[in-house]
Each structure stands twice: as structure tokens, then as C-alpha cells.
Amino acid sequence: MSKINAAITCVHGVVPDKILSNKDLEKMVDTNDEWITTRTGIKERRIVADGETLSDLGSEVVKAICNKRGISPLEIDMIIVGTVTADHRFPSTSNIVCDKSGATNAWGFDLSAACSGFIYTLVTGQQFVESGRYKKVIVLGGDIMSSIVNYKDRNTCVIFGDGCAGVLLEPDQEGNGIIDSILKVDGSGRELLIQKHGGSAFPITKENVGHPDNFIFQEGRSVFKFAVTKMADVSAEIMERNNLTGEDVNWLVPHQANLRIIDATANRMGLTKEKVMINIEKYGNTTSATIPLCLWEWEKKLKKGDVSKFLELMRKHIHQHGKIYTADQLCENFTGEKLNINYFVKYAKEKYANIYGI
């Protein structure tokens, strides 16, 4: 029996109608469009209307995914929501989304991992599909960051926006789907990016209502230094582990935290800007929603599998056997003959003869 992979078969996203531009923020805090744009790449962000909740956006995403896929919400087995701005402490936003979307046969839970939320949630959903027990798992990433942003703090209010997007995971046995992942965490820097009040460590009381610690705090310079290094490092690590070069990668779908961080990651991976999904200028940092919102916006440019045929062949015939056979044996099993330098010599002559006049 072929290995079951969890494949993304459908994607959708939702953003609020209200736009909060840099010009709007100039009227609220001591900042300006040029300062925000040069440091973050953000021009505007979306903000929910009064009374609009994450479960409203999430249920809209679920309904749209089911409609696009031609299935009933009743067919969904599970919904996992990555968020740090759930509707309530409990019940989970996943629970509410199941009800509002009509996915009443599904179960699920929320996963809190802030900017890593969608990736953590996606890999979690992958495990349920690849177990063979679940056929249709929807993974949502969404946040109403405006609910925890202090609009008197110019260091944070210029960065964050609201939105929600998600994907449908289904089993695939044709070699498509999630191939590999590297997940890491470092809690030692928690004081640099935190919503300090509101948990059991520091409950909100009548004495501290309105305190700045009730909102998100970010020590921007330290977070930037950490993110620009670690995001590039882990991207390079997963490429090396899977024997990939920049030419093998069709798309980089980065978390939309800061344009300079995205550029540094792409450079480390050897990717041109044309291969990088960027929409931070329109939506800002929507935390758990950034990656699936990119997938939704680029949906029409994505193809099934979206990996080169050569890479598929290499994985099948070379990479998975690399520690078992010698190089000669691998080459002979794959092509029918042992390593032969004449092929490279022919390739080099054809490529460089005209360039160097030889």
C-alpha cells in the first residue's frame, strides 16, 4: 500500500472590508507613511467591524472551501484553528466555527502559537490525515489582532491587521502533499514579544484595566534580529535536508512579518523575488493568517504537486536510497548504466562553447 500523504486540495481566505492605511495611522500616533513603509513594507491593513469575530471569518472560510471543493460541511471530519485571539477562552473558536459553518460532524481545537500558528496547525492536521483515520481536515489560521493592539503604541499598531484563511487537507497516495517540516521554538525570548496580562499568571482585574500590559508588546529590534536569522536558517536547513536548490523551489510562502525579513530569507535560499509570495503591503502582519492568505491570493498560479518532475524522480530513485547504495549503484539502478563523465563533458561543451568561443 502506498504511503498516505496529507495534501492541500483547496484554499480560501477572508479579510475584513475596513482598511486602516498608514495615512490613517498618522492621525492616531506619531508616525508617517514613509517611516512605516521603509521599515516594514506595510501600506495598509484590514480591521474587523464592531461585533465581527474570528469565528465569523473562520466559518466563512470553511463554507467557501466546501463550496469550492463541491462537498458538504457535514463531510468535514475536523477543524483546527491556529490563533492567539480566539473568540473566548472557552469554548474553542474551532467549536464555534463548526457550529456556524454547519460542520456539525467535525471536532477540533484551537492551537496557540502566534506567528508560527498556521505552520504548527498545518503539521498537526497532517498527522491526523496521515494516520488514515481522517479524510477531510480543515486547518485555519486567523487572528483579530486589532483586539489586542494598543493604538497609542506606534511600535505595534503599525504592524498588525486582521484576517483568516485556511486549507483543506485530504489523503493523497500519488506522491503529492506535505513532504517535510522543521518546527522549532525558543521560549527564552518571551519577554520580547508578549501579551503579559490576561492569562492565569497576570489576570485582568479592575485595578489593571487599561494597563499597557493588557495589549501586545514587542521589542522590535531584538525580535527583528532573531527572526531575520532564524527564518533564513530554518529555510536553508530544510532545503539542504531535501537536497533542494533555489532552482528546484517554485514558491516561497513566508510569514508576512516584515519585508526585510522576507528578503533576507529569499536571498539565503537563492530565490528571485518573482518566486516569493508577498502581500504584507495590503494586509500587514495578520499573525496566524499570513501564510494561508498568500496561498489564497496566489491560488490560480499554483499547480498540483508544484514540484519539478526531475525532483520527483530524484526523490523516488535517489534520495530515499542514498544511504543504502553506492553512487555507481544508484546511477545504474536509475538510468541503467554507471556514472559516466562523458555526459557532463558533453553538457559543458554545449553550454560554454559559444560563450567562450571554444
Image (tube, rainbow, N blue to C red):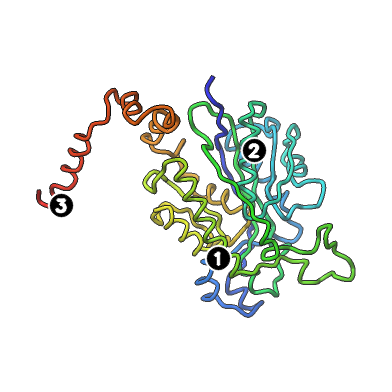
Identified by mark 2, the residue type is Gly
Identified by mark 3, the residue type is Ile
Checking the image for residue 54, the label placed there is none
Identified by mark 1, the residue type is Lys
In the rendered structure, which disc, 3 or 1, sits on the residue that comes first in sequence?
1
Counting from the top left corner in percent of width and height, residue 98 is at 74, 40
Q: Residues within 10 Å of mark 3 (few under 14, many from 20)?
A: few
In the rendered structure, which disc, 2 or 1, sits on the residue that comes first in sequence?
2
Nearer the observer, disc 2 or disc 1? 1
In the rendered structure, which disc, 2 or 3, sits on the residue that comes first in sequence?
2
Q: Given the current orientation, which residue lies at the most extreme top position? A: 1
What residue sits 76% from the left and 34% below the top? 104
Counting from the top left corner in percent of width and height, residue 34 is at 51, 76
Residue topped by disc 3: 355
For label 2, the SS is helix
Checking the image for residue 225, the label placed there is 1
Seen in the image, is 159 located left or right of residue 315? Answer: right
Q: Given the current orientation, which residue lies at the most extreme bottom position? A: 30
What residue sits 90% from the left and 68% below the top? 206
Relative to 209, residue 307 above or below: above
Q: Residues within 10 Å of mark 1 (few under 14, many from 20)?
A: few
Seen in the image, is 14 located left or right of residue 261? Answer: right
Which is nearer the eye, 126 or 60? 126
Kindly report the distance in space between the C-alpha atoms of the residues bearing marks 2 and 3: 51 Å
Q: Hey, which quadrant is residue 287 in on the image?
A: bottom right
For label 1, the SS is helix
Q: Hey, which quadrant is residue 268 in on the image?
A: bottom left
Residue topped by disc 2: 125
Kindly report the distance in space between the C-alpha atoms of the residues bearing marks 2 and 1: 30 Å
Kindly report the distance in space between the C-alpha atoms of the residues bearing marks 3 and 1: 42 Å
Seen in the image, is 200 located left or right of residue 118? Answer: right
Nearer the observer, disc 2 or disc 3? 3
